[in-house]
């Protein structure tokens, strides 16, 4: 029997296996929506045993919920659910179309695996020119030959992943020797995942160092590396304020330090406070959030020129309140 038909009436068990909210009927689930994170907006009425659900972010059946929440392909979910509920049937093999993004993802990963680390390259020299002496240990590589705008450059490649380790973006910084290339879009982000999965990817970041009990996040790569050097803690780059405000710290992080850009329009600080509040209201291990910002525009400016930094501390009142 096809998986979707075999799963009818068994969605309560399936949702429990994947850590999804239970079937709630006409009542709303008190916790966060597994897709958008909105609290008290999600409900699963399981109409006709289909696992149907509705939230402010959308609606659909059980299979759609799992696809959006886990980011797993349809075929993978079907195989897992078949094993869970004991469904066996002969599935016709359907070749997946090769999309432009999937082709690009394969090319990027094939190339990334062959690239060198930054040490001893013009990539290291570029960072040293920004006052950065401590190199990232993960997710960043150096490309000594990058063609762009009809010319040959070098590049720093960085891979951004989500909370499940799925590839999300390639961040590329074009270099001309030990300087940033003087071209349009010298810094560029390229999507490595299909929609709609990419829209619902959680905690997207360039994980520059391993997870630690005290973890920092900052927007730009150079800002994150500057914060690592100044404050001596592991720091990840969320690339922009949009990803920062949606970031949820992984298990094991008790103290989250959010290093905000002090930009004129206030987007950096707004994202930092939103992120801090979200983490303290989430079911994770964060007990304390420190939001820090420099008097200058960002922490790389602070590293080079020197200035004071400000801090606001947020704490979780009771762990149960976020449950």
Image (cartoon, rainbow, N blue to C red):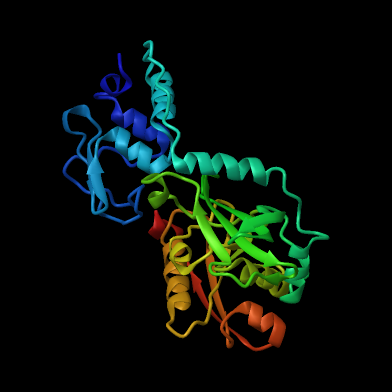
Q: Is residue 48 visible?
A: yes
Q: Nearer the viewer, residue 21 or 103?
A: 103
Q: Give the residue drawn at x 32%, y 50%.
A: 33
Q: Give the residue drawn at x 39%, y 25%.
A: 78
Horizontal placement of 103 versus 231: left or right? left
Q: Give the residue drawn at x 38%, y 14%.
A: 91
Horizontal placement of 129 versus 26: left or right? right
Q: Quadrant of the N terminus?
A: top left
Q: Nearer the viewer, residue 182 or 121?
A: 182
Q: Is residue 318 visible?
A: no
Q: Nearer the viewer, residue 32 or 167?
A: 167
Picture coordinates of residue 195, whole percent (x, y): 38, 46
Q: Residue reaching furthest right?
A: 120
The answer to whether residue 298 is above or below residue 285 is: below
**Number of dots carrying numbers:** 0
Q: Quadrant of residue 165?
A: top right
Picture coordinates of residue 251, whole percent (x, y): 55, 51
The answer to whether residue 302 is above or below residue 196 is: below
Picture coordinates of residue 136, whole percent (x, y): 71, 60
Horizontal placement of 174 versus 56: left or right? right
The answer to whether residue 200 is above or below residue 180 is: above
Q: Nearer the viewer, residue 200 or 38?
A: 200
The answer to whether residue 125 is above or below residue 100 is: below
Picture coordinates of residue 194, whole percent (x, y): 42, 44
């Amino acid at each position: 029997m096809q998986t979707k038909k075999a799963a009818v009436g068994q969605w309560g068990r399936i949702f429990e296996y994947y850590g999804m909210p239970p079937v709630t009927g006409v009542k709303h689930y008190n916790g966060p929506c597994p897709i958008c994170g909105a609290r008290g907006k999600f409900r699963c009425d399981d109409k006709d045993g289909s696992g149907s659900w509705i939230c402010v972010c959308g609606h659909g059946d059980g299979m759609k919920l799992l696809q959006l929440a886990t980011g797993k392909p349809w075929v993978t979910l079907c195989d897992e659910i078949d094993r869970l509920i004991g469904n066996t049937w002969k599935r016709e093999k359907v070749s997946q179309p090769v999309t432009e993004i999937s082709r690009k993802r394969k090319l990027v990963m094939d190339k990334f695996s062959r690239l060198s680390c930054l040490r001893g390259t013009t990539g290291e020299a570029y960072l040293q020119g920004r006052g950065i002496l401590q190199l990232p240990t993960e997710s960043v590589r150096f490309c000594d030959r990058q063609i762009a705008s009809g010319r040959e450059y070098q590049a720093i490649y960085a891979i951004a992943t989500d909370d499940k380790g799925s590839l999300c973006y390639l961040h590329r910084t074009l270099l001309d020797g030990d300087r940033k290339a003087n071209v349009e879009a010298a810094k560029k982000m390229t999507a490595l995942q299909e929609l709609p999965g990419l829209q619902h990817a959680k905690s997207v970041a360039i994980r520059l160092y391993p997870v630690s009990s005290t973890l920092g996040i900052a927007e730009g790569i150079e800002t994150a590396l500057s914060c690592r050097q100044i404050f001596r803690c592991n720091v990840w780059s969320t690339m922009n304020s949009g990803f920062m405000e949606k970031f949820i710290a992984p298990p094991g992080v008790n103290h989250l330090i959010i290093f905000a850009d002090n930009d004129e329009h206030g987007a950096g600080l707004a994202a930092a406070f939103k992120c801090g509040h979200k983490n303290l209201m989430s079911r994770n291990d964060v007990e304390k959030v420190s939001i820090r910002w420099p008097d200058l525009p960002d922490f790389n400016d602070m590293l080079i020129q020197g200035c004071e930094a400000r801090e606001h501390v947020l704490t979780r009142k009771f762990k149960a309140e976020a449950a």
